[in-house]
């Protein structure tokens, strides 16, 4: 109806406008209002006393959620019907548990470095994101070569790129789901609090342009702040997608998670508070003798920032700078990412 009203409004101004066609048919219904689930059929109310029945085919995975809905563990929300599928919205109340440890995650371009601090042990682990980085570079070069081959045929570019990007998205989602499920399972088994950096405005800040004078025409124009290669790598990274998927998986498992500021996490020493003195990209070096991976140092600083904001001091003693017996063994380990 909204499309038809827009067509009528535009028709009054322009008589040559074509009649709209519905290409993707879909219908939304709500259980208890105009729909009812009866075993393997969905009954939709068309008019008072008239119903439309849709036969549904369930697998074991889908039937599990319907059984949970009957038991009251989850609730079913709005239902979307297409010519081939019936999509159910599943809702669950988020009630995070009381954490018994900390899991700090440093999300990078090619890895996710984690430091888990529990009462009796400290576990360091690196989760590999290099296959996604290589896949992004591969599809970027494929798209560039396609545009060079058909520079003026945008129809061919659109058809081929849509097929490629669909395959790329499926591969990326499959890899991230399997990797993040491991992190979520580890946090759930040990009842840990997940700490992440606030990276919401990272890409916006990277792509921000500044006003400078053009050396060729002497005019003030907007210029990018970073080189093109770094901009391309940063925009192809999966920082936001990893955090989005990690958050909703954590909420589904009732795992608490928090954000801390991303400022100077990989540049500040967790023991003396000094700045990094090394020009090495991945290695952190301080005057007090600390030399290790920047990603590991960032995880420790994130825990320290959380400790300062946390009212519960039960988790803060492990990161107290006065008790160097906890931090020094961690920073003395040879950790390669």
Image: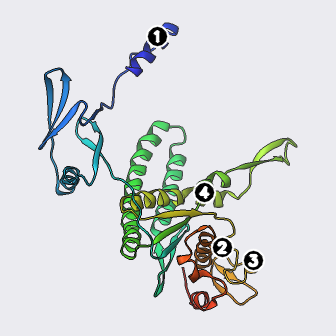
Q: State which quadrant residue 248 falls in.
A: bottom left
Between 27 and 273, the one nearer to me in the picture: 273
Residue, disc 1: 11
Q: How is the image coloured?
A: rainbow
Q: Earlier in the sequence, mark 4 or mark 1?
A: 1
Q: Residue furthest right?
A: 218
Q: Is residue 16 visible?
A: no
Circle number at residue 232 = 4
**Marks 2 and 1 in Cβ contact (< 8 Å):** no
Judged from the image, the secondary structure of the residue bearing numbered disc 3 is loop
Q: Nearer the viewer, mark 4 or mark 3?
A: 3
What's the distance in space between the residues labelled 2 and 4, CA to CA? 22 Å
What's the distance in space between the residues labelled 2 and 1, CA to CA? 59 Å
What's the distance in space between the residues labelled 4 and 3, CA to CA? 28 Å
Residue 118 position in % (x across, y down)? 47, 81
Judged from the image, the secondary structure of the residue bearing numbered disc 4 is helix
49 left or right, relative to 218: left
Residue, disc 2: 266
Residue 224 position in % (x across, y down)? 72, 51
Circle number at residue 82 = none
What's the distance in space between the residues labelled 3 and 1, CA to CA? 66 Å
What's the distance in space between the residues labelled 3 and 2, CA to CA? 9 Å
Identify which residue is drawn at 49% across, 37% down. 153
Q: State which quadrant residue 292 falls in.
A: bottom right
Q: State which quadrant residue 131 falls in.
A: bottom left
Residue, disc 3: 275
Q: Nearer the viewer, mark 2 or mark 4?
A: 2
Q: Is residue 281 visible?
A: yes
Q: Earlier in the sequence, mark 2 or mark 1?
A: 1
Judged from the image, the secondary structure of the residue bearing numbered disc 1 is helix
Q: Quadrant of the N terminus?
A: top left
């Amino acid at each position: 109806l909204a499309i038809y009203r827009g067509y009528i409004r535009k028709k009054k101004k322009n008589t040559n406008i074509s009649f709209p066609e519905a290409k993707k048919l879909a219908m939304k219904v709500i259980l208890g209002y105009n729909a009812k689930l009866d075993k393997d059929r969905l009954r939709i109310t068309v008019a008072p006393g008239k119903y439309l029945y849709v036969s549904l085919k369930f697998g074991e995975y889908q039937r599990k959620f319907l059984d949970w809905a009957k038991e009251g563990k989850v609730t079913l929300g709005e239902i979307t019907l297409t010519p081939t599928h019936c999509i159910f919205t599943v809702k669950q109340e988020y009630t995070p548990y009381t954490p018994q440890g900390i899991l700090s995650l440093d999300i990078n371009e090619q890895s996710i470095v984690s430091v888990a601090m529990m009462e009796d042990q400290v576990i360091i682990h690196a989760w590999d994101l290099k296959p996604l980085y290589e896949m992004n570079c591969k599809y970027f070069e494929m798209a560039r070569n396609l545009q060079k081959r058909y520079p003026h045929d945008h129809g061919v570019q659109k058809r081929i790129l849509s097929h490629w990007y669909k395959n790329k998205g499926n591969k990326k989602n499959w890899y991230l789901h399997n990797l993040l499920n491991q992190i979520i399972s580890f946090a759930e088994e040990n009842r840990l609090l997940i700490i992440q950096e606030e990276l919401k405005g990272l890409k916006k800040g990277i792509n921000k342009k500044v006003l400078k004078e053009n050396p060729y025409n002497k005019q003030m124009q907007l210029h990018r702040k970073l080189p093109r290669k770094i901009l391309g790598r940063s925009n192809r990274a999966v920082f936001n997608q990893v955090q989005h998927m990690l958050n909703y998986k954590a909420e589904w498992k009732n795992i608490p998670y928090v954000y801390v500021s991303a400022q100077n996490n990989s540049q500040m020493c967790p023991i003396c508070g000094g700045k990094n003195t090394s020009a090495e990209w991945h290695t952190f070096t301080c005057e007090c003798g600390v030399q290790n991976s920047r990603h590991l140092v960032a995880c420790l600083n994130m825990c320290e920032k959380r400790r300062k904001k946390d009212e519960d001091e039960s988790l803060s003693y492990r990161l107290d700078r006065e008790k160097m017996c906890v931090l020094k063994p961690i920073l003395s380990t040879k950790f390669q990412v």
